[in-house]
Image (cartoon, rainbow, N blue to C red):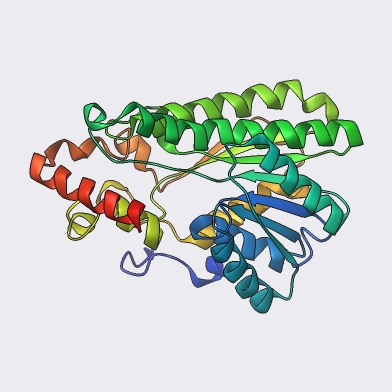
Amino acid sequence: MQFPDINNPVNSSALSGMLKDDALKGKTIIITGGGTGLGKAMGTYFLKLGANLVITSRKLEVLQKTAGEMETETGGKVLAVACDVRNYEEVEKVLNDAVQMFGRVDVLINNAAGNFISPTERLSANAFSTVIDIVLKGSVNCSLALGKYWISEKIPGNMLNIITTYAFTGSAYVVPSACAKGGVLALTRSLAVEWGRHGIRTNAIAPGPFPTKGAWERLLPGEMAEKFSFKNRVPLKRVGEHQELANLAAFLISDFSAYINGEVITIDGGEWLQGAGQFNGLEMVTDQMWDEIGQSTRAVKGS
């Protein structure tokens, strides 16, 4: 029996995309938090599969740069719209702009997120509320706006929520995020039942470690990223590749998954089974190290 090489564990064919080229042809997709990281990776693949794309975040300059890069790489069409998902009126504007440009919207990806890694007693009430407002309230605002639109226009919409494995286990040191993502998990399952009769499917992906340069450097600055390397917690002994997540997301919003509704699919290399809560192991972080994390977070926030 020939075993895989664990030093080079990802088959290159898996990183080139798994669906046929026109799998999302003609579909218009809104991705919140679509300007960077996993949102950008998913959006780029959706464009390669023939979709029209709308990307949102609060930073228009970042969105416009990303949109230009995506269009150059794929030849697809991207609409960049600045939006704070905490404000329902701004979400409605994104929807209206998307319909005006592309004629209709078929898919919503609730991907916008915020997080702090910190002992909970060190957090202010405002910090706690900020994460919940972005992750949970933002997902609710987008889901409500698109749901009303789909039901009114009799469009069989498709919603995909990006949660996390600790949404169903909880996790120390990221309590606001765990609370908010747990709420999005409940939203996913609830709307799958209620809106299924309208032909609207609602599913979720719970990723494990899929490092993104900006977000992970802010969460674990300096040497801490290596000291608390998440790949050591994963039975497969590696972190996820962005294309692997994009492949799963593309399948779940495609017609190939038309009978999947209310499902939450974990993609984490078996990590949560090995130990619930990605950040529970941070109990070994000293007070001095927490101070360094806090200083780094404040420095980024103030920039």
Question: Which residue is located at x 64 percent, y 51 percent?
Answer: 31
* As drawn, 83 above or below 147: below
250 and 34: which is toward the camera: 34
Q: Quadrant of residue 144?
A: top right
Q: How many marks?
A: 0
x and y percent of residue 3 in the render? 36, 63
Quarter placement of the C terminus: bottom left
Residue 301 drawn at (x, y percent)? 35, 51
**Residue 28 visible in rendering:** yes
Residue 91 vs 19, above or below: the answer is above
272 left or right of 97 in image: left
Camera-side residue of 101 and 254 = 101
Residue at 51%, 60% (x, y): give it: 36
Q: Residue at x 68, y 34 (%)?
A: 143
Please indicate whether residue 268 sits to the left or right of residue 30 in the image: left
Look at the picture and state if 35 lies above or below 297: below
Q: Nearer the viewer, residue 247 or 129?
A: 129
